[in-house]
Image: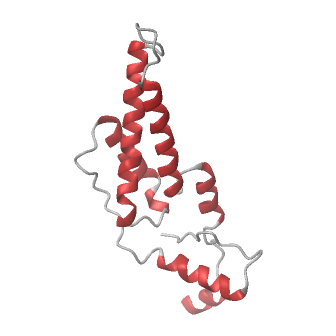
Amino acid sequence: MARMKIGDSDSHYTKEEREQRQNANEKLFDYQEMSEKPPAILKREALKEWKRIVATVKQDMPWSENDYQILVAYCLAVKTMYDAQQDLNKRGLILDDGKSNPAVRVQSQAIKDMRSCAQSLAMTLDGRLKVELNKPSKELDPFEVVMNE
């Protein structure tokens, strides 16, 4: 797997700071790799989301076992959002007693939780952009070419 560089930039760092960042980037891959097995607590939409994320995103990320629970929380928030939407579809925004449906607040909080977890796992558009911009280039090293001949 090509190793991405987290927060790599030459613009305003000293040589020492760049070296520290490079070392930190390499250490991201020293942690125990995250298990792809979903926990039993995930059901329906949460389990579908787990499988989708693991199949599409995890391959490019240096996720470790330390990130496992954040991904679980993200998937649970997805399920909560869907459940709240089902309640809203069934009962509407305003209940028969004239009060606001509490599912609105539940759904809003679930979306905030999803956003927070997604940012922590670099799954947002901005996070993916940083990953893509910081992937090592595929350029051939002339020295490596000579050594492999």
Horizontally, is 29 left or right of 141 in the view?
Answer: left
Instruction: Please tell me in which quadrant of the rendered image residue 13 appears.
Output: bottom right
Quarter of the image where the C terminus is located: bottom right
What percent of the width, then of the height, locates residue 131? 59, 62
What percent of the width, then of the height, locates residue 99? 45, 14
Please determine whether, in this image, residue 62 is positioned above or below residue 27. Answer: above
| Nearer to us in this view, 5 or 138 | 5
Colour mode of the rendering: secondary structure
Looking at the image, which residue is at 48% across and 16% down? 93
What percent of the width, then of the height, locates residue 106? 43, 31
Looking at the image, which residue is at 32% across and 42% down? 47
Please determine whether, in this image, residue 75 is positioned above or below residue 6. Answer: above
- Total labels drawn: 0
Looking at the image, which residue is at 40% across and 13% down? 91
Q: Residue furthest right?
A: 11
Please determine whether, in this image, residue 25 is positioned above or below residue 85. Answer: below
Looking at the image, which residue is at 54% across and 53% down? 119
Q: Residue furthest left?
A: 40
Horizontally, is 18 left or right of 65 in the view?
Answer: right
| Nearer to us in this view, 84 or 98 | 98
What percent of the width, then of the height, locates residue 83? 36, 28
Please determine whether, in this image, residue 33 is positioned above or below residue 78. Answer: below
Horizontally, is 89 left or right of 19 in the view?
Answer: left
Instruction: Please tell me in which quadrant of the rendered image residue 142 appears.
Output: bottom right
| Nearer to us in this view, 88 or 33 | 88
